[in-house]
Amino acid sequence: MGNIQKICIIGGGNMGRAIAGGIAANPGSGMKNIIVTARTRETLGKIEALGPAVKTSQDNIGAAAGADLVIIAVKPWQTRDVLEEIRPVLDYGKCTVASVVAGISFSELKDMLHKDTGDGNDMPGLMRIIPNTAIALGMSTTFIAACGVQPEIYKEVEDIFGKMGEVVAVPEEMMPAGTALASCGIAYALKYLDAAIQGGTDIGFSREEARKIVINTMKGAIALLETGGTSPQEEIDKVTTPGGYTAKGLAAMEEYGFQEAVMQGLLKSMQR
Ligand SMILES: NC(=O)c1ccc[n+]([C@@H]2O[C@H](COP(=O)([O-])OP(=O)(O)OC[C@H]3O[C@@H](n4cnc5c(N)ncnc54)[C@H](OP(=O)(O)O)[C@@H]3O)[C@@H](O)[C@H]2O)c1
């Protein structure tokens, strides 16, 4: 640790706030300075609730100046304006720009960030980082791809995000797949839970009872996999007798296209 002394997060919404909170909760990482920007005082107020370690500002230029790591956490359509705004004050000789924006490629980031510095540093180190919303609980699955980043800087960024869950290093071309499986995937896992809770109420439980039962059942299923190191199919086989209740239920789910629905959802969420 030590190269990254000042971190600026542009966009203190859900993702920016979760990242700032994760960094602030791990002071062992040796960071001196974290500053988060947003457009509104309302959003900055939520950031300030993280405690005094995280500074806030509505001034992107002032916040980004001198930063060693600039994390871009605005919506995709806001990215170009924000990068063009801060570009003049970024020191490309030492700064790394990490985008958590889904679907914006290195080539697009290069187009937005290029400047003729005259000293050969026409581009900062670039990273693309895709966490999921469980980052707020330190349980994210976070995909990282890098372009022109010094190994020691890469390691420091990997360590920062490693304290907020699992980090998976991928080449850029795997980013859409990672986003679909883990980032959109949180919603897909919840979609099953929601359907099961709804089903539970339809077969006689109150919503509250169904919620508790379904969450606990899911926790049990995950614990079986993690404890036994087994595959889902192995655990399914243990509860499935040919012709039995579970077998009939699984067959009905397949008949209604369960596996295909999941696959199509993944494929669709990889398209831009
Ligand atoms: N949510 C996820 O699961 C997830 C996962 C992976 C990646 N991402 C990516 O993360 C990015 C942010 O998503 P999010 O869910 O955090 O969105 P969000 O809650 O809407 O946050 C975006 C923030 O950007 C701020 N902002 C907009 N324009 C700005 C500007 N010119 N200067 C400074 N701040 C500005 C907004 O400030 P105000 O609130 O003050 O308007 C807002 O707080 C997206 O690009 C998304 O693709 C999200």
Image (cartoon, rainbow, N blue to C red):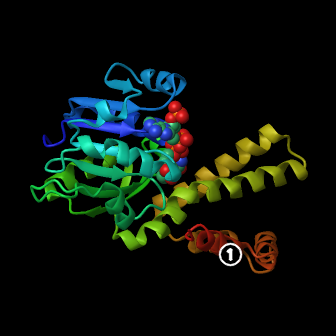
Residue 168 appears anywhere in the view? no
Q: Percent from the top left, x then y, of residue 64?
A: 29, 37
Residue reaching furthest to the left: 119
For label 1, the SS is helix
Name the side, left or right, on which 208 lies relative to 158: right
- Compared with 137, 92 (above or below) is below
Residue 256 appears anywhere in the view? yes
Q: Percent from the top left, x then y, of residue 91?
A: 18, 45
Name the side, left or right, on which 263 lies relative to 32: right
Q: Nearer the viewer, residue 17 or 241?
A: 17
Q: Nearer the viewer, residue 152 or 226?
A: 152
| Residue 23 location, quadrant | top left
| Quadrant in which the C terminus is drawn | bottom right
- Give the residue pinned by disc 1: 259
Q: Percent from the top left, x then y, of residue 59?
A: 37, 29
- Compared with 134, 243 (above or below) is below
Q: Is disc 1 surrounded by few (<14), some (14 to 19) or many (20+) residues within 10 Å?
A: few
